[in-house]
Structure formats: C-alpha cells, structure tokens
Image (cartoon, rainbow, N blue to C red):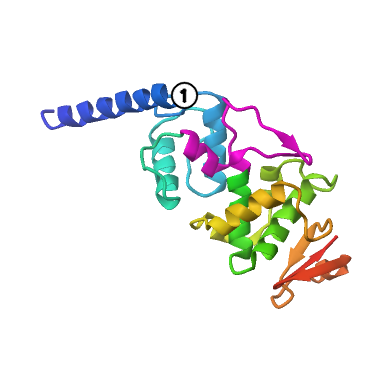
Amino acid sequence: MVFAVPCLLALFAAMILMRGLAAAQGTVLYWGSSGNEVSSVQQRLSQWGYYKGPVDGVYGYETFRAVQNFQRNNGLPQDGVVGRATREALGLSSPDNAPAVSRGAVTDRGDTTLLARVIEGEAADESLQGKIAVGAVILNRTKSAAFPRTISGVIFQDHAFESISNGQAYRPLTQQSIQAAQMALSGYDPTGGALFFWNPYKPVSSWIWSRNIVTQIGNHVFAR
C-alpha cells in the first residue's frame, strides 16, 4: 500500500493538470470527460486502429492511451488530452467553431488536415498539381449523390482509399500536401470534375477502366 500512494498521487496530479489545460485552452476532452464528443473521438480512433474499447462516450484509461498513441504517431505533445491540435489531426470539428460549408463539404481546419493526410498518403511523390488533383477528387465526391456529403464521409467510406487501409495517410504531413489541400478547398480543380483516380501502372479493378477518363496528371489517371 505504501508504494501505491505515490502512484495515486501522480494520477490525481495528472488529472488536475488536464483540468487546468482545459481551462487554459477552452473546450477540450480529457480523462473523466463524457458525452457525444468523446464518442466521436473514440469512433475515429477505432476507425484508425488506435482504440479497441467500447464507443461508450466515457473518457477512461483506454481512450487516454489511444489518444497518447495517436499523438505520438502524429508529432503532437503526448498529454492524452484532445485539445485543438489533436482535434484537427483527428479531422474533428471543434465545438467552439461553427464549420464553414463550401462545395457541399465541411471545410474547417480539421478537414483541411484530414484532406492533406489522404493527399500525402495517395500522392506523396506527385507534383503539387498532382496532389491538388487528388484533393479535388475527394471534394468532387462530396457534391455527387453517389458519395457521402462530407470530406470525412468520403475518406472513410469502406475501401475508398488505399492509404487509409494501409496506414500511409497517417505518416508525417509535408507542407506541400497541406498547401495542396488548401488550394483544392479554395476551388481549384485541375481534373475538370473527376470522381476517380488510379495509377495505371499498378493492378486495379477492370471496372475502373469503364469510367470516362478526363486527364492524366503525373502517375494518376483521372475519370468521371
């Protein structure tokens, strides 16, 4: 019991520190929080393979550790607190900021980061133009009745993007991918409205070749 006391004191001190961070940074989520926002964080972390527990809206030890692991892999302070930077990296809107709606999709800073991650994962070796094109395809899908209406909905649609499945979207972001996401969100579309892209030099489904090819930029073919 003597050895347990310092551990408990350290735990309580950590919880007090997290509450202090909440007061300093505005609305944040931390160990002890509960509600729909916590459920959203748990669901996103579960989608990305960080969280294995129940999506119950209770910020406990498993959620805390999952957040820390996510922060570690994304170059964020490993405090286990979901503040502004961690929210943005998760692609979740902050409740303090009403999201702006443009081109049928949410375009807050969190979605900019999320879009940039898929651009990085799918087109890391492409030119700026090629990166913007990939971002434009995602945004074009949000305007199509055949796809979800939000950026996150399009990106996390089952089997939509290989970089989500294989984890390439979660590697460190480059400034060029962020720039490409911002330019795509501003309305620049070098694909002319494409809804699909693929690398013709890699094995792909024969179905994709039935689409109407619009252009090729770098190593990607773009089609409607």
Under tag 1, what secondary structure?
Answer: loop
Name the spot of residue 51 as percent of width and height, x first. Answer: 48, 43
Residue beneath the point at 82% across and 58% down: 194
Of residue 112 and residue 30, the one placed in the foreground of this image is: 112
Please check the rendered image and state whether residue 44 is part of the magenta-colored stretch, yes or no. Answer: no
**Region of the chain picked out in magenta, as a range:** 83-111
Residue 157 visible to an observer of this rendering: no
Q: Is residue 58 visible?
A: yes
Please state which of residues 116 and 52 is positioned toward the viewer in this rendering: 116
Q: Residue furthest left?
A: 2
Q: Residue at x 57, y 61 (%)?
A: 166
| Residue occupied by mark 1 | 26
User: In the rendered structure, which amino acid carries the disc numbered 1?
Assistant: Gly
Crowd rating for badge 1 (residues with CA inside 10 Å; few <14, some 14–19, many 20+): few
Left-right relation of 194 to 43: right
Residue in the image at 75% along x and 64% along y: 197
Q: Residue furthest bottom?
A: 201
